[in-house]
Amino acid sequence: MINIEKFYHENMEFEVPGSVYYPREDSLLMAKIIENANIHGSVLEIGCGSGFLSILLAKRDASVTAVDVNKEAIEASQLNCDTNNVEIKLFLSDLFEKVEGKFDVIVFNPPYLPVEEGETDETYAGGSTGRETIERFVLEVKKHLNPNGTVYLVISSLTGEAEVKKLFEKEGLTVETAAKEKVPWEELIIIKAFLNN
């Protein structure tokens, strides 16, 4: 029997299987930022998990594509789309591997925690620096952004804010800190990067 937890936000209900990332403080901080940004147009969420952020965006009239490397996450997202009466284009992809086209906004809550060698839980393990997946993401992201496109990325103070910003700058994007929130053991940070055309 798969362990399924319920998650509620505003008037929405989500089912989150044990193998899929459960929305926590980082997801809620990202939700707050993207709600305040009043996002429309085309949106891509990388690593959609339960579909929480994608569904939030679709409810606000964005045209959303969402991908995840975890098959259970895609299934959970589809179920949660049905429950919350929204349509999202969902498919399995390791970062941008199967993604085609360009988007106005790209959202990513990556595995960002530094971990010991051999720890590979895809929901949080970001390699020895916490930046392994983020580095792969940043190298590809520009190719999938429309002119004046924006990226929203969640990291932790343990990931290295300055180092992550440098990764984006190296690829020619402008970077700023959109939000910070103190939680036990760390500070959560939303990085906003954009393409100036």
Image (cartoon, rainbow, N blue to C red):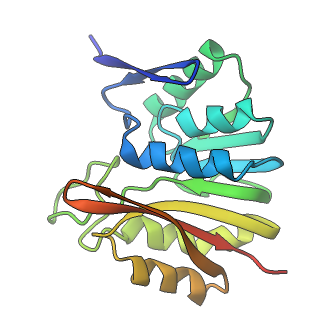
Residue 81 image offset from top left, x and y in percent: 63, 22
58 lies above or below 2: below
Between 195 and 69, the residue placed more toward the observer is: 195
120 lies above or below 51: below
Q: Is residue 93 visible?
A: no
Quadrant occupied by the N terminus = top left
> Which image quadrant for residue 110?
bottom left
The residue under the point 41% across, 36% down is 23
Quadrant occupied by the C terminus = bottom right
Residue 84 image offset from top left, x and y in percent: 64, 17
125 lies above or below 51: below
Horizontal relation, residue 130 to residue 193: left or right: left
Horizontal relation, residue 2 to residue 161: left or right: left
Horizontal relation, residue 178 to residue 2: left or right: right
The residue under the point 72% across, 23% down is 86
Between 52 and 92, the residue placed more toward the observer is: 52
